[in-house]
Image (tube, rainbow, N blue to C red):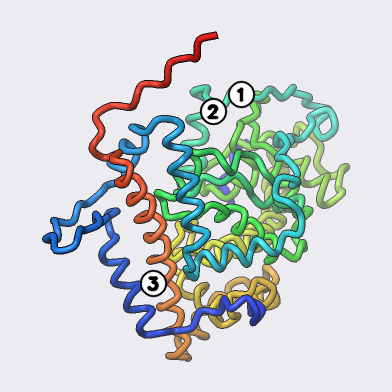
């Protein structure tokens, strides 16, 4: 069958953003100067200021590729060292979020393969074996392009993520990978941004929709038994696309969440489809509202204008206002978050909170501008380090060192 998808921080941490006119003017000036990855060379005393050189993303990527492996490692190590001393609002937030995790990030659980519903258990009358497609197969690629096409693409290359079905932060990449750190810094993300984001999502989640989100976190499959890597049932139902839903997946959700096993049995007759899918939709909508809202709010904890799905882009200023009114403290924001049935009212309340308070509005806009400038400061630092190494002027990569003679 085919389905149309249903669509505060502690005072000692000194993180609450306050509007400071001189600070904000300076940050906004840096924002204006840094657009397009501008970077200024150091001037010798008495020298005339040369024309500002604009560095595009493509220029920076090429420059980095011109460094040897050892030079790339050295560049990223210097980036990390300088960022430790860069006292921006964004980096203070990253450092605070890291305190929400008591364990070493290296001890966090590894991401496991995405499960899928077993046809032998949930559709024994239609036991079509499941087979996982290769991620680079044309069938899998086309499905990802179609189903995920409305999902905003972030510039962040994460190595940690929050698993809404398990209630845990998971690691699935190498945080210290040189190319990953470079890509993130070029997009304005400091090392640790992904872990901080995942920890804030965890802090905002009260677990009330965990069972539903775990069920919808199963892999998306089709009636032929293909399992699509990189696509979950949550993705499919959020996509707004017409999707193919085999009985095993729909019944797996119903069996898991409702415990109903004798009302709908595979193969489900056409006359029962509407009632069955309506039941699943009523489970999905509150789960989507719960997760979607908290993910969107968490994204604005560290970023001025994150790419958000659905109607959330219109709420970015409201969410910054929410953080500002709660001293950028996840625990305080979590107290204000609504149950799914009050989702619409909550968004209206966020808007009213800002529109009725000119001081909060000014502080909110200043928070956004500061985070934008902070991201550009990371990019500008990366460009400066590449310039210091003469990477932009290179025509080729240095030859690797000759192997040592035995």
Indicate the quadrant containing the N terminus: top left, top right, bottom left or bottom right: top right
Query: Is 333 above or below relative to 291?
Result: below
> Disc 1 or 2, which lies upstream in sequence?
1
Query: Mark on residue 145?
Result: none
Horizontal side of residue 107 vs 235, given as left or right:
right
Judge the density around disc 3: few (<14), some (14-19), many (≥20) Cα neighbours within 10 Å: some
Disc 2: which residue: 140
Q: CA distance from mark 3 to mark 1?
A: 44 Å
Indicate the quadrant containing the C terminus: top left, top right, bottom left or bottom right: top right
> Disc 3 or 2, which lies upstream in sequence?
2
Q: Are marks 1 and 2 in contact (CB under 8 Å)?
A: yes
Disc 3: which residue: 369
Query: Is 247 above or below relative to 197?
Result: above
Q: CA distance from mark 1 to mark 2?
A: 6 Å
Q: Residue at x 42, y 20 (%)?
A: 401
Q: Residue 221: image x %, image y %?
A: 65, 32
Disc 1: which residue: 133
Location of residue 11 (image quadrant): bottom right
| Secondary structure beneath label 3 | helix
């Amino acid at each position: 069958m085919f389905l149309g998808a249903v669509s505060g921080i502690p005072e000692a941490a000194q993180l609450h953003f306050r509007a400071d006119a001189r600070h904000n003017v300076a940050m906004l000036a840096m924002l204006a100067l840094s657009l397009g990855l501008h970077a200024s060379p150091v001037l010798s005393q008495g020298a005339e200021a040369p024309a500002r050189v604009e560095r595009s993303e493509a220029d920076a990527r090429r420059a980095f590729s011109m460094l040897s492996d050892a030079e790339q490692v050295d560049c990223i190590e210097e980036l990390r060292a300088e960022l430790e001393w860069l006292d921006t609002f964004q980096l203070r937030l990253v450092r605070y979020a890291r305190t929400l995790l008591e364990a070493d990030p290296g001890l966090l659980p590894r991401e496991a393969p995405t499960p899928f519903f077993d046809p032998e258990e949930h559709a024994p009358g239609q036991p079509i074996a499941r087979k996982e497609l290769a991620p680079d197969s044309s069938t899998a690629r086309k499905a990802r392009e179609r189903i995920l096409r409305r999902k905003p693409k972030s510039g962040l290359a994460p190595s940690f993520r929050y698993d809404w079905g398990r209630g845990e932060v998971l690691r699935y990449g190498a945080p210290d990978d040189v190319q990953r750190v470079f890509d993130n810094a070029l997009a304005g993300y400091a090392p640790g941004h992904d872990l901080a984001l995942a920890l804030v999502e965890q802090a905002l989640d009260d677990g009330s929709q965990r069972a539903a989100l775990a069920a919808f976190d199963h892999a998306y499959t089709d009636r032929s038994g293909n399992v699509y890597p990189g696509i979950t049932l949550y993705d499919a139902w959020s996509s707004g696309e017409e999707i193919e839903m085999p009985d095993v997946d729909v019944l797996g959700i119903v069996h898991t969440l409702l415990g109903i096993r004798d009302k709908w049995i595979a193969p489900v007759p056409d006359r029962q489809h509407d009632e069955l899918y309506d039941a699943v939709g009523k489970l999905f909508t509150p789960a989507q509202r719960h997760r979607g809202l908290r993910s969107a709010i968490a994204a604005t904890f560290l970023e001025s204008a994150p790419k958000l799905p659905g109607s959330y882009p219109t709420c970015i200023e409201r969410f910054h206002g929410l953080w500002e009114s709660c001293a950028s403290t996840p625990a305080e924001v979590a107290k204000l978050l609504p149950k799914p049935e009050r989702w619409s009212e909550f968004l209206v309340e966020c808007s009213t909170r800002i529109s009725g308070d000119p001081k909060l509005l000014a502080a909110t806009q200043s928070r956004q501008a500061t985070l934008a400038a902070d991201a550009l400061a990371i990019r500008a630092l990366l460009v400066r380090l590449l310039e210091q190494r003469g990477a932009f002027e290179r025509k080729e990569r240095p030859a690797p060192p000759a192997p040592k003679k035995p």
